[in-house]
Amino acid sequence: MTTPPEISFCETDLDAIGNATGRVAVFIGAEGKMDPSGRRVNRLTRGALARFVQSERFTKLKPGEAKALAFPAGMAAEAVDVVRLDRRPTVEEARKAGAALAKLQNGAESLILAGSNPRAAEISLGFALRAYTFDAHKTGEKTPAGKARIMVGKPEAVATAAAPMAAVAEGVFFTRDLINEPSNVLTTDDFAARLAAMQELGLEVEILEESDLEKLGMRLLLSVGNGSVSPSKVVVMHWNGGKPGEAPLALVGKGVVFDTGGISLKPAAGMEDMTMDMGGAGVVSGVMRTLALRKAKANVVGLVGLVENMPSGEATRPGDVVKSMKGDTVEIINTDAEGRLVLADVLWYAQDRFKPSAMINLATLTGAIVIGLGHEMAGVFSNNDVFSTDFLDAAAQEGEGAWRMPLAPAYDKLLESRVADMKNVGGRPAGSITAAQFLQRFVKEDCPWIHLDIAGVASVKSDTTLAPKGATGWGVMALDRLVRDKFES
């Protein structure tokens, strides 16, 4: 997998600044005051830093933004990166500052002069997240992995605070790699093998093969993969860090490694983006990696349904009726509404086997949620107000956009079928809501549940603050925060 940048923390040493090679970063607040490190840089550059701070270029910077002074006289560094950041920044501003420095780095080592900034650990997380690149399939010269030393007043304390954040960064990188991989590489077999390898981190990993799924009655999930030569699977990951016997939180992910739409074939334009249709499973996998790396004191089980949706003589047809593991029958009106079929069986299995204290599923489920919320927010559907609020609070703390959407019995009539217990689609109106209503039929009434439709946020076409274009890793930070705040003992 792509390795996060090497970040270390060292005690502030003013005499070492002048001889540092690579890039040197300084933080200066809106009022223009410099800390001891900034004053040393200003003295070394014979007042160049002060002149820049007094210029219009600096005053136009927003909190967390940076500008580079190239090849500063009096220093060995190739650049001084000046970041506008107050001495007591918000979490968002600190992460943005770290990300700005990573974006400027371009392979050189960075010396970041954080001094006594109380958000130094958050600066390191922003730096790590934005340093991500996915170049596994490029044959030319590759950009070296990022590297940074952060000078702070209390390096041991900051390193302790940053350690769980480093675990989060690795989980995000793992998710981004999975979502960015082309589907001829990330087959269902390869996906399962990557998850099995996480046993070395302390996770217990089970792989349910097609024969196992047939015995369990997961006919909806299997119907999605009928047209593909890649075998359908369910991978179960256990993290048992909480009290013995305590009911786990269940995380369930849609893992369609490629989605042609099946017999209901998608248009050719843009179909290449369907390599990211396993985004929900990717997020679940990244969260489980994070929990194992930071030794979370919680019981969490992650389940991902891995399938490929292809057209062939064996593929499920529109109009077919398939019985779910629960026992309900579903008329398949549109084979391109396949993710809900995968999730339905895995949700029921998760409840039937693990009796979870709560359950969250994630899926790149509907284009309708992109129309409604764009690429800024994931859609949040829930049967439990308290649980939903807890997640929304966690997402807000981590800066991951999420917006609660409605569920109501009135939408169920759109799923009525003439020949089966339900249809798998309800037409164009309220498409993301009827998809959630479909899933809710496979959630027991006493189980707090959230459905996250991440179709608009899992992968994007332009850079974000913390990620280059492509896979974002959205959800890993929010779910890790939720576990930390509400499920750890």
Image (cartoon, grey):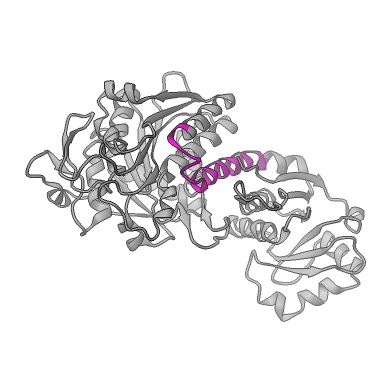
Q: Is residue 236 left or right of residue 414?
A: right
Task: Give the magenta range.
Answer: 161-189
The residue most toward the bottom is: 56
Residue 35 percent location from the top left of the image? 80, 62
Tell how many labels: 0
Q: Going 93% across and 66% down the picture, which residue do you hit?
A: 74
Residue 384 seen anywhere in this rendered image of the structure: no
Tell me the quarter of the picture where residue 112 sits: bottom right
Q: Is residue 461 left or right of residue 451?
A: right
447 or 142, nearer to the observer? 142
- Magenta stretch holds residue 334: no
Residue at image position (28%, 53%) is: 432
Q: Is residue 182 above or below residue 24?
A: above
What percent of the width, then of the height, locates residue 281? Answer: 43, 40
Which quarter of the figure is the N terminus placed in? Answer: top right
Q: Is residue 149 left or right of residue 46?
A: left
Q: Nearer the viewer, residue 346 or 214?
A: 214
Asked whether residue 184 is drawn in magenta, I would say yes
The reply to whether residue 192 is visible in this rendering is yes
Residue at the limit of the structure toward the top, as seen here? 244
The chief SS type of the magenta part is helix
* Residue at (66, 41) in percent of width and height: 161
Can you tell which quarter of the image residue 102 is in?
bottom right
The x and y percentages for residue 489 are 49, 29
